[in-house]
Image (cartoon, grey):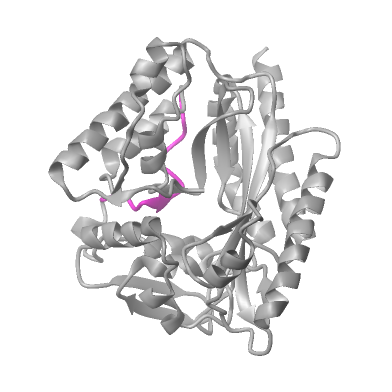
């Protein structure tokens, strides 16, 4: 989940202060990597389940997420998403061994069963799918943005960088679609089953490169979003839709050299996770800022683990399909994760867990094979 306490980075002094904190976070992360502070003796997995809320009779988007959340405040696993017709559940991190995948399946199914019962009070239900086929362009009006400061700030920040008057969505499959939209809320069409894999710093480079290699077969086996706005497009339309929904560039050739914020990256990793963070800071302007109270380098000097909030805020505005993540475990040690954002939601929980099992097993299995070859 993204950091919620953020503001749009417009004031020059606020921007400078945030960038200073961002660079200090990078230094702190480099130090922790060099001094081997990171947890490296356990492999954990986790997941985030996004979903669409629809009317019971018409299956059209039901913009009730805020009302549902107000009735389920005691459910810490249920969170808002960008649009009022989306919600998200977050799974408990668990060690990658024995019955972890079947346990995750039970957890996801249990949450969705509870939520389905609650949605009955709203004459609505939930759908698991990469793109809801009943969505129409007017459903992506800004009035359907979830009323949270983070989302509002994100939309305004992306809009402030837009070159031109509109976002352009152009795709050709069986049908062709050309849509111009006045906001990046097109992003809300996508719903995913995002899987997290915790790895050690030594494993990160080979495991991340393997995850990149597996993106194509993962998309091929999990594809379930062929329809958008009534048009038959790609088997997995989410990929192009997400990139174009946040693409602030013009269609003129001389502007296409600027990197999109949604991508698979620009090459293989060679030495460290730091290559990703440094590239993203160099390539992408800061969109969101936050009031940073911690001094990450000061905490390092005291032997304490910093949260690296500035780095995490910036990382949350660069949408790699395989995203690097930093966190702090219950043990108090920092850890690194690879977040797979390729897999779509649905069509069933069993399908999602099967997709996750393939990706997790392939990444870890191929990673172990590589380590044995190097030995």
Q: Residue 150: x, y in percent?
A: 38, 55
> Residue 120's spot in the image, x, y percent?
72, 78
Q: Position of residue 165 (x, y in %)?
A: 21, 72
Taking the spot 62% from the left edge, 41% from the top edge, the residue there is 196
Quadrant assignment, res 119: bottom right
Q: Is 268 contained in the magenta span?
A: yes
The quadrant of the rendering that contains the C terminus is top right
**Residue 130 visible (yes or no):** no
Picture quadrant of residue 100 = top right
Within the magenta stretch, is there residue 168?
no
Q: At x 42% / y 70%, what residue is drawn?
A: 145
Q: Which residues are magenta?
A: 258-270
Of all residues, the one furthest to the left in this rendering is: 12
Which secondary structure class fits the magenta region best?
loop
- Looking at the image, which residue is at 66% across and 42% down? 46
Q: Is residue 191 visible?
A: yes
Closer-to-camera residue (359/254): 359
**In the image: residue 360, left or right of residue 159:** right
Position of residue 197 relative to residue 130, above or below, is above
Above or below, 75 relative to 310: below
Q: Foreground residue, 32 or 252? A: 32
Residue at figure coordinates x 51%, y 36% from the top left: 325
The residue most toward the bottom is 57
Horizontal side of residue 139 vs 192, given as left or right: left
User: Looking at this view, is 202 or 374 the one in front?
Assistant: 202
Q: Quadrant of residue 29?
A: top left
């Amino acid at each position: 989940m993204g950091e919620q306490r953020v503001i749009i980075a417009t004031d020059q002094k606020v921007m400078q202060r945030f960038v200073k904190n961002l660079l200090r976070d990078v230094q702190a992360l480099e130090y922790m990597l060099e001094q081997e502070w990171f947890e490296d003796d356990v492999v954990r997995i986790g997941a985030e389940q996004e979903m669409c809320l629809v009317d019971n009779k018409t299956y059209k988007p039901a913009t009730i997420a805020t009302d549902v959340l107000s009735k389920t405040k005691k459910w810490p696993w249920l969170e808002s998403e960008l649009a009022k017709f989306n919600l998200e559940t977050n799974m408990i991190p668990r060690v990658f061994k024995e019955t972890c995948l079947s346990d995750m399946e039970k957890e996801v199914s249990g949450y969705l069963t509870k939520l389905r019962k609650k949605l009955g009070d709203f004459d609505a239900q939930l759908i698991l799918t990469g793109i809801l086929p009943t969505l129409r362009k007017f459903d992506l009006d800004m009035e359907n943005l979830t009323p949270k400061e983070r989302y509002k700030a994100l939309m305004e920040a992306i809009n402030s960088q837009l070159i031109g008057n509109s976002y352009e969505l152009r795709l050709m499959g069986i049908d062709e679609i050309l849509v111009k939209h006045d906001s990046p809320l097109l992003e809300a069409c996508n719903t995913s089953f995002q899987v997290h894999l915790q790895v050690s710093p030594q494993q990160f480079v080979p495991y991340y490169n393997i995850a990149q290699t597996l993106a194509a077969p993962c998309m091929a086996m999990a594809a379930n979003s062929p329809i958008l706005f009534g048009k038959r497009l790609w088997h997995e339309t989410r990929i192009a839709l997400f990139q174009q929904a946040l693409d602030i560039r013009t269609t003129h050739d001389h502007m296409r050299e600027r990197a999109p914020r949604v991508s698979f990256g620009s090459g293989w990793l060679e030495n460290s996770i730091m290559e990703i963070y440094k590239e993203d800071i160099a390539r992408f302007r800061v969109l969101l800022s936050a009031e940073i109270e911690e001094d990450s380098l000061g905490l390092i000097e005291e032997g304490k683990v910093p949260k690296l909030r500035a780095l995490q805020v910036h990382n949350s505005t660069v949408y790699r399909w395989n995203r690097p993540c930093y966190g702090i475990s219950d043990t108090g040690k920092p850890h690194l994760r690879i977040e797979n954002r390729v897999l779509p939601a649905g069509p069933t929980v069993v399908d999602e867990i099967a997709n996750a099992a393939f990706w997790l097993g392939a990444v870890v299995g191929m990673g172990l094979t590589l380590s044995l070859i190097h030995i």
